[in-house]
Amino acid sequence: MSETADLLVEIGTEELPPKALRSLSLAFTEGVREGLVQAGLEHGEVVPYATPRRLAVLVSDLAAGQPERQLERRGPALKAAFDEEGAPTRAATGFAGSCGVDVEQLEKLENEQGSWLVFRSTEMGQATPSLVPGIVENALAGLPIPKRMRWGSSETEFVRPVHWVLLLYGEDVIEAEILGVNTGRRTRGHRFHHPNSISLEQPSAYALQLYGSAYVVVDFDTRRSMVRKQAEAAAKEFGGKAIINDALLDEVTALVEWPVAVSGSFDEEYLELPDPALIATMQGNQKYFPVVDDAGKLQARFITISNIESSNPDAVRSGNERVIRPRLSDAQFFYRNDLRYSLEERLEGLKTVVFQKDLGSLFEKARRVSRLAAHIAIAMGETPEAVELARRAGRLCKCDLLSEMVGEFPELQGTMGRYYAIASGEPEAVALALEESYAPRVAGAAVPASPTSQAVAMADKLDTLVGIFGIGQVPSGDKDPFALRRAALGALRIMIEAKLDLNLPRLLEAAVAEYPESVDRAVVDPVFAFMNERLRAYFLDRGILADVFSAVQARQPERPYDFSRRVQAVGAFRKLPEGEALSAANKRIGNILKKAEGELAEQVDDALFGEDAEWNLAAKLTGLSPQVRKLLEEGDYTGALTRLAGLREAVDDFFDNVQVMAENPAVRKNRLTLLNNIHGLFLQTADISRLQF
């Protein structure tokens, strides 16, 4: 094994975009790893490091160079290489000359296919220091940077200006120019605590040296853990609990190199604001962690993470308290101003806000959603009172978009609608539906819990789907400006997870009916197909096998919840001992019936049975059929398939001992009809012949 050493690459920059830091770091690390693999350089662990001012990668036990390669170049066949006297021909001398050797130095290759002249040589691998700069440059060029910038008079482009590049292999610097900067062994510490450069002698000392003497925690995950623990501890000091979500935690971690938690407070008068507004102000504007008490009630406190270890922490605290005060004052002003108008009074204003230029205003969308929500509530079997609640919630579901609070914090759309609905005296179900009409907001989030919310949320999503499809703006590739994939999946999840047995094509038809004639009426089928693709992804993400989905999809169920029950049933059937044999039998039956199309009797005639195996199979089927049909009517597909699994021995015996395609036409039709009856019972759940074992 060749000699190895550790490699350290560090790109020192101005402060990197905090929301992109982690993705940049992982992409850079993966780019370096791929480059090493492509170059054939053996190595050990590859570790990413990232702070606001640096992207770094540490590669342990990197080989000193590429391994030698044995090359073989085939020349002319021996028959063409030498004449009858054994002298080399021009073909042989020409080949030898192209290889830079004499004919005598060539070797012979003989195998079953023939015999040829060959030239064999050993190619020495390149040294690692000569390969690393190119690998690093390629990795940097492949980073997901939407917009690169230039600085100074250089033509170099990167996400931020680059100030230093450290490139160390073992104890030696790999000399190169990367991003317009000459490489070296010097790095830099914390901008304030240790602004001077630091000479690094060994890559393995990188993280420890910066932590111990330069106030820099280079490992992102370590720093993230420190931020969380410090925030939790700071909140616990006054009996509270910090609200920490992953997105904000990542962003705060990307803003500091030496995290120090500082607690602060604000005037309690601001607690009159709805909690989501206060939290959005603290998290969105200031990157603070809000604090709640043991009962979950928001406190007039916050935790901020400073990037310095101040000798006067009170000054840091008071500075942050001074900064947040005007932010909270603005939020208070927005909220009080918004309360001057009821949601009903904002309806007219929706006429001036465009939903989509070809689909009209938000006022028109709200009107469509209102009608469709009522239609869905009726389909759900809701009472007339509940139907009117859905109609009302659909009418008001976009009104909070005109509020100043949502204008400042778009992520609060729907949430503020609930608060303003309560303030306007709307029924609780209507208020909740305004918030839950956007649910599920993200992957994995809960679906709406109340029937009114479910009806409005589905109506909003289905209206958008048929409208955008109706004007020909179908998602393609990664482009989905109206988030139709998310809308489709959201509507499907509501129907499945809330156990709503609704006919999806009928709902799509109702949605299209609310649009004017300018919207293509023939969108139901393509939207249904689009949603079925999302349904496939939904089940595969939950561990359902592709063949199970395909077996159910073959029956084209129109009710997503019914589809889900079938999938669960087929998944359970697939695990039964009888599953594989019955799947194969159904496939065989299907092929037989295709070839014998039209050769079926109206019903099975017992008098035509001539074999014990067909008597036994018919008897088994007769005994099972009433139970199976009852289970199918109840939607108990699992129970139905479990009962049908009892046919396995009788089906196997039938195929072993009965000639289906008998010469007697009446007997043949009778046997085909018996098989068709069995096949039909299975098909009422799924086409199990599609299962792959």
Image (cartoon, rainbow, N blue to C red):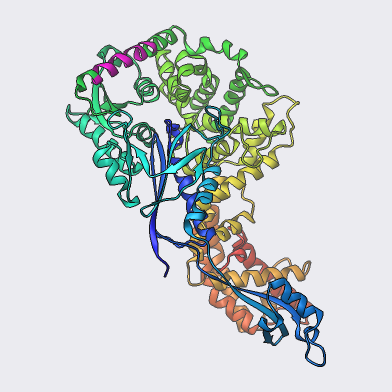
Residue 683's x, y, as percent? 62, 60
Is residue 238 toward the left or the right of residue 137 in the image?
Answer: left
Q: Can residue 294 be seen at all in this image of the molecule?
A: no
Is residue 672 toward the left or the right of residue 16 in the image?
Answer: right
Q: Would you say residue 327 sits in the magenta stretch?
A: yes
* Quarter of the image that includes the N terminus: bottom left
Q: Can residue 43 be seen at all in this image of the molecule?
A: yes
Residue 187's x, y, as percent? 36, 40
Query: Which residue is outermost to the bottom?
Result: 85
Picture residue at 27% right of the left edge, 46% below the top: 208
* Quarter of the image that includes the C terminus: bottom right
Picture residue at 26% right of the left edge, 27% below the top: 292
Residue 651 figure quarter: bottom right
Q: Would you say residue 380 sits in the magenta stretch?
A: no
Considering the whole magenta stretch, tell me its main secondary structure: helix
Picture residue at 28% right of the left edge, 37% below the top: 214
Q: What stretch is highlighted in magenta?
A: 316-330
- From the viewer's side, name the closer residue of 290 and 662: 290
Residue 599's x, y, as percent? 77, 70
Residue 47's x, y, as percent? 39, 51
- From the viewer's side, name the closer residue of 673 and 48: 48
Note whether 448 is above or below 75 in the view shown.
above
Residue 55 figure quarter: top left
